[in-house]
Amino acid sequence: MDDTVEYAESAGVPMPEVAAPFASGMMVVAGLGIVLWRLPRIATGAAVAFLTVVTATMHDFWNADEDDKSGERLAFFGNLAMLGGALVFLREAYKN
């Protein structure tokens, strides 16, 4: 978790020692909610909200140094793929 806090701090996240564990916990709970299909609207909504914010702000490869650009691009597109999946689950949650 220390690495996550440091990464959040380097990205300018306010109160990274609180935000990073909260965000990590939120994704674990959202993932469990999706897998178990418990409170699916809340679980998928939380995942979509998290991924939307984090993808654009934490993995902005277009602003990264040349040494970091490749890793940030990989994380950006990985998150974008997960966001697409979360949106599909969100649509399914609202069908029921």
Image: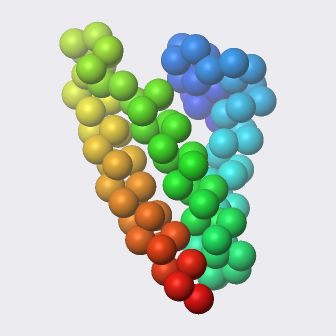
Q: Position of residue 76 (x, y in %)?
A: 34, 38
Quadrant in which residue 75 is drawn: top left
Vertical relation: 21 (above or below) 9:
below
User: In the rendered view, does 74 fall on the left or right side of 4?
Assistant: left
| Colouring rule applied to residues | rainbow
Most extreme residue toward the right, as rendered?
Answer: 18
User: In the rendered view, does 87 fall on the left or right side of 72?
Assistant: right
User: In the rendered view, does 57 fall on the left or right side of 35?
Assistant: left
Q: Residue at x 22, y 12 (%)?
A: 66
Of residue 7 and residue 39, the one placed in the foreground of this image is: 39
User: Can the viewer see residue 9 in this picture?
Assistant: yes
Q: Residue at x 74, y 20 (%)?
A: 15
Quadrant in which residue 28 is drawn: bottom right
Q: Residue at x 62, y 20 (%)?
A: 13
Most extreme residue toward the front, as rendered?
Answer: 95
Vertical relation: 60 (above or below) 35:
above
Of residue 70 and residue 91, the one placed in the foreground of this image is: 91
